[in-house]
């Protein structure tokens, strides 16, 4: 009788372990071990683009924090270059903007991250322009590949017909040796996008699209 109970217990234990293994396999973390650095553009005295009391720097940070949350849920380790309304410039720097951008680039480079994403909003003198767009610097051969994947996902989910573009003139991006791109996730100068970009639900949607793009890039 004792041996019978031992056999039954062992079978039950084996089944339980098998079930837990299958459950763990089903709950995949596609970005496990990946390190992503997010750069919420502007901050502090530099608000970036603005409309009345709406500052690009604030929206960049809000969206970046939502992207961070989405990526962490897929297993990534995520850092921000800033976590509040400030810049990274050395105090009393003569060229404060250049100091800020240089230090952001240095932080990203020293991290050895797998990917960086610089989050910005676009703006023009015309209210008609709209749509999210990706810019890449050719300093890294992976940057164009990342840009292509991201623009495809932005087009699929955020109703944009814009195309990703090469731009080697941006001070910070040209100094970053880690793979990554700059995302202009909408136009603050466009009334419709300006309205949407302030909504938490739309910011969540942007974050989800970015998450999908990161996963797609690494799976491809």
Image (spheres, helix red, strand yellow):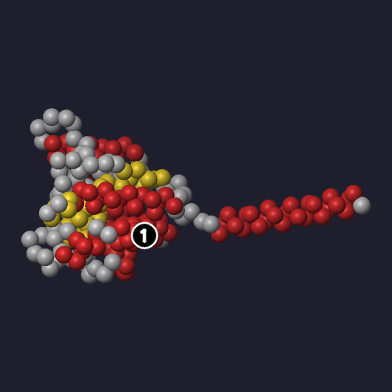
In the picture, which quadrant includes the C terminus? bottom left
Looking at the image, the residue that sits furthest to the left is 125
Residue at 66% from the left image edge and 57% from the top image edge: 19
In front of the other: 161 or 195: 195
Q: Where is residue 171 in the image (x, y as percent from the top left)?
A: 16, 45
Residue at position x 24%, y 40% in the image: 104
Residue at left 38%, top 50%? 69
**Of residues 155 and 198, the one drawn nearer to the viewer in this rendering:** 198
In this picture, residue 166 sits left or right of residue 219: left
Quick check: can you spot residue 139? no
Residue sitting at x 41%, y 45%: 77
Q: Is residue 48 positioned above or below 163 on the image?
A: above
Residue 87 appears at what percent x and percent y? 20, 39
In this view, the residue farthest toward the right is 1
Find residue 192 and report its image quarter. bottom left
| Residue in front for this viewpoint, 214 or 82 | 82
**Horizontal side, residue 172 vs residue 180: left or right:** left
**Residue reaching furthest top?**
92
In front of the other: 39 or 150:
39
Residue at image mark 1: 208
Residue 63 in sight here: yes
Counting other residues with Cα less than 10 Å from the Cα at mark 1, is it few (<14), some (14-19), or many (20 or more)? some
Location of residue 15 with respect to 163 vertically, above or below? above
Local secondary structure at mark 1:
helix
Q: What is the number of callouts on the image?
A: 1
The location of residue 110, given as percent across then percent down, is 31, 37
Across and down, in percent, residue 160 comes to: 24, 68
């Amino acid at each position: 009788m004792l041996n019978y109970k031992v056999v039954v217990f062992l079978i039950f234990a084996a089944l339980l372990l098998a079930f837990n293994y299958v459950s763990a396999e089903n709950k995949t973390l596609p970005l496990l071990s990946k390190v992503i650095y997010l750069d919420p553009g502007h901050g502090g005295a530099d608000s970036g683009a603005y409309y009345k009391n709406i500052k690009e720097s604030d929206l960049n940070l809000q969206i970046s924090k939502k992207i961070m949350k989405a990526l962490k849920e897929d297993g990534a380790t995520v850092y921000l270059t800033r976590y509040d309304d400030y810049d990274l410039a050395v105090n009393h720097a003569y060229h404060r903007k250049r100091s800020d951008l240089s230090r952001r680039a240095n932080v990203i480079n020293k991290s050895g991250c797998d990917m960086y994403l610089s989050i910005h909003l676009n703006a023009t003198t015309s209210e008609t322009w709209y749509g999210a767009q990706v810019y890449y610097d050719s300093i890294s051969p992976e940057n164009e590949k990342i840009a292509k994947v991201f623009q495809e996902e932005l087009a699929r989910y955020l109703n944009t017909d814009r195309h990703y573009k090469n731009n080697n003139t941006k001070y910070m991006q040209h100094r970053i040796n880690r793979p990554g791109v700059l995302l202009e996730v909408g136009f603050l100068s466009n009334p419709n996008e300006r309205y949407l970009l302030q909504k938490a639900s739309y910011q969540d949607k942007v974050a989800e699209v970015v998450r999908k793009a990161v996963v797609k890039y690494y799976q491809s």
